[in-house]
Amino acid sequence: MSTMINHNILSMTAQRNIWATQNQLDRAVTRLSSGLRINNSWDDPAGMVISERFRAQISSMAEAERNANNDINLIQTAEGALTVIDETLTRMRALAIEASNGTLTASDRMALDVEYQQLKSEVNRIAQVTNYNGLNLIDGTYSSTGIKFHIGTYNLQNEDYYYVSFNSMSTSALSLTGTSLLNTANAQAAIGSIDTAISSKDTERTRLGAHVERLQGTISKLMMSRENATASESYIRDADYAVEMSEFIRTQMLMQSGVSILTQANMVPQMVASIMG
C-alpha cells in the first residue's frame, strides 16, 4: 500500500467509521433512555406512521369507554328516580285498596286522599327534577329525539353512536290524572290506573336496563380492542431492552476500538516522515 503525507486516507476512513458508530451509539442510548424504538421519524418512517395510527385509535377507544361509562351513569340516574316512583306507586295502590273498603267514613277517605294526592304530586315532581348534567331525563324532553350515545371510534350511526329515548314518567304520561279516593268507585278505578302506571314504569325500567347491559358489553369489547391495539403499537414503537443493550455494548466496543485505530492512523504520516529523516 502506498504511504503518503499530504492525505491520510487511513485516518479519514477511521473517522468515517467512528462517525457511523457514534450515530449507532447515540441511537442505542436514546432508545434505552426513552424506552422507545422509534423516537424520530427517521428511525422507522413506515413504523412511525402505523404506530401513530394505532395511538389515535387507542386514545379514541379510551374516550369511547369513558363515554359508555357516562352513559351508564346517566341511565342509572333515571333508574334511581324510577325506583322512587315505584315505591310511591306501591304506596298509592295500598291506599287505593284501603279506600275501596266500604267500612270507611267520608272523613277516613278524605284523609287517605290527602296522602294519595301528595304522592301523586311527588311523582310529577320527580319526573320534572330528575336530570343528569342538566339533561332532564324522565319529563318527556327526550321521549322522541333521544340522547346520543357515542360509544365508537368513528362516526357511523348504529355502529359508533345511537340514540336512547327516555319516556315521560309524569302522572299524565302514566294516566294517573283525575284519580281520587273520595269514594269506593273512584278508589277502585284508581287501582286499575295505578296498575297501568306500574306496568308502564316497569316497561321503561326493563328497556333502560337492557341499554345498560348493552353498554357494559360495549365497554368490555372496547377494553379488549384497546388492549390488543396497545400491544400492537408497543411491538412497533417500544424498545426491546435486550436488543438495545446488546447494541449499546457493541457500539461502545466499536467506539473504543475506532478511537484506538484513529490514533494509530494519525501516526502513519509521522512514521513516513521518520523514514525521510
Image (cartoon, helix red, strand yellow):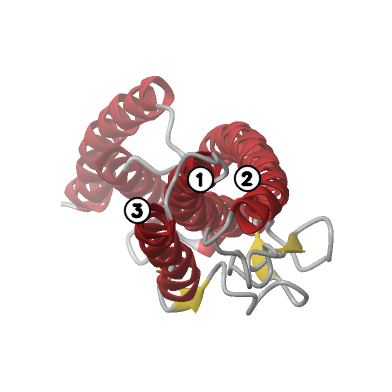
Please report whichever mark, 3 or 1, sits nearer to the chain's N-terminal start. Answer: 3
Badge 1 is on which residue?
86
Callouts 1 and 2 close, C-beta under 8 Å: yes
In the image, 240: left or right of 198? left
Residue at (29%, 25%) from the top-left corner? 249
Q: Is residue 238 visible?
A: yes
Callouts 3 and 1 close, C-beta under 8 Å: no
| Residue density around tag 2, few if under 14, some if 14–19, many if 20 or more, within 10 Å | some
Nearer the camera: disc 3 or disc 2: 2
Q: Which mark is residue 15?
A: 3
In the image, 175: left or right of 43? right
In the displayed structure, 165 sits above or below 213; it is below
Residue 230 x/y as whole percent: 54, 39
* Res. 252 image quadrant: top left
Q: Which mark is residue 241?
A: none
Nearer the camera: disc 3 or disc 1: 1
Task: Indicate the secondary structure of the residue bearing disc 1.
Answer: helix
Please report whichever mark, 3 or 2, sits nearer to the chain's N-terminal start. Answer: 3
Residue at (44%, 66%) from the top-left corner? 117
Q: Nearer the viewer, residue 194 or 38?
A: 194
Q: Which mark is residue 205?
A: 2
Q: Nearer the viewer, residue 238 or 157?
A: 157
Residue 4 x/y as whole percent: 39, 56
The residues tagged by marks 3 and 2 sit, at their Cα atoms, a distance apart of 78 Å
Task: Indicate the secondary structure of the residue bearing disc 2.
Answer: helix
Task: Identify the amino acid type marked 2.
Answer: Arg
